[in-house]
Amino acid sequence: MLTIGELAFYAGVTVRAVRHYHARGLLPEPERDHSGYRRYDATAMVELIKIRTLAEAGVPLTRVRELLQAGEEEFRAAVAEIDKRLRAEIRQRQRRRERIARLTSGENLVLPPMVVDYLDRLRALGVDERIVQVERDGWIPLAARSPERVPEWMARKREQLADPRLVDFYLTLGRALDRAEDDPRLVELADELAAYLTRMADELGEDYVDDTGIEPPLVKLMDALVFDSVPPARRLIELLRQRGWTGWTELKRVDAAPLDNRRTTRSPVLSPDDVNLG
């Protein structure tokens, strides 16, 4: 016969747990002996180990009582169901572990692999990391909002990166990040980009250039992100507007400024709300 302390020790639980199981009606509480102690036999230890095993498996104590009273076949079926649930929880926890592990790679956590590959391609081409970061931050809401369109957008991006002139534009823009807004190189950039967009629209159609289908509020948010992260982009958009194009996240044709005024006239700096936002 065992004392409550010995019973708890051999069953791998605490004395407090034994008393809790008594209170819940899971483990019968023996009468005290002539010395005033409660004594437990081997049956009590076996029952206590069953209770502990089921409780550790996550079975609610109300369900534990039912299982302890169940017949052999019902008990076996219930245990099989518990095992099935535990295996599902293990798979779920494994997926969570994988997501946590991906935190170390940052971009992989919130972006589809094809977008991560695209960003890595920009880096391999020597594009300034600040531009890559802006691209990354822009793709995060896009991929979350319209994941089904990411393959289409990525295919278009890969085609565009195959054009050395666009790659050169990226590289030149990177060198312009540390320049003042009145740097004449931005004017040259605007000329190059406007010519590139016009040629692409003429060859492939304007829908190819501006068919993003992004909601105006999201366009505003993403444009503001670009302007805050890459200050020269605001001036560049202003210059592009004078050359017949506007927008950053969503490009649109507009009426170009007269040729004589393009290089000599500078309109006030546009706010994100002024720049082609739908």
Image: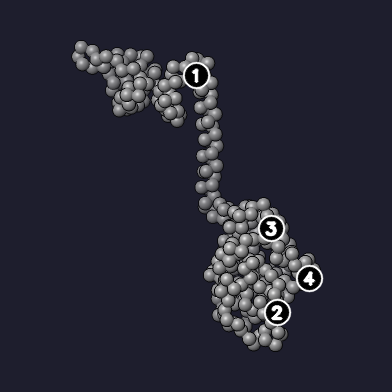
- Please indicate, yes or no, whether residue 102 appears anywhere in the rendered image: yes
The residue type indicated by label 4 comes to Asp
The tag on residue 128 is none
Helix, strand or loop under label 1: helix
- Please indicate, yes or no, whether residue 189 appears anywhere in the rendered image: no
Q: Earlier in the sequence, mark 2 or mark 4?
A: 4
The residue type indicated by label 1 comes to Phe
Q: Earlier in the sequence, mark 2 or mark 3?
A: 3
- Residue at 62% across, 77% down: 238
Task: Give the vertical position of 208 relative to 89 (above or below).
Answer: below
The tag on residue 202 is 4
The residue type indicated by label 3 comes to Met
- How far apart marks 2 and 3 lie (CA) works out to 30 Å
The tag on residue 154 is 3
- Residue at 59% across, 73% down: 274
Helix, strand or loop under label 2: loop
Q: Position of residue 243 (x, y in %)?
A: 69, 78
As drawn, which residue projects farthest toward the left?
A: 35
Q: Earlier in the sequence, mark 4 or mark 3?
A: 3
- Residue at 32% across, 24% down: 23
- How far apart marks 2 and 1 lie (CA) works out to 80 Å
Q: Position of residue 233 (x, y in %)?
A: 59, 73
Q: Which residue is mark 2?
A: 256
Judged by depth in the image, the label closer to the viewer, 2 or 3, is 2
Judged by depth in the image, the label closer to the viewer, 4 or 3, is 4
Q: Is 143 positioned to the left or the right of 50 in the image?
A: right
The tag on residue 75 is 1
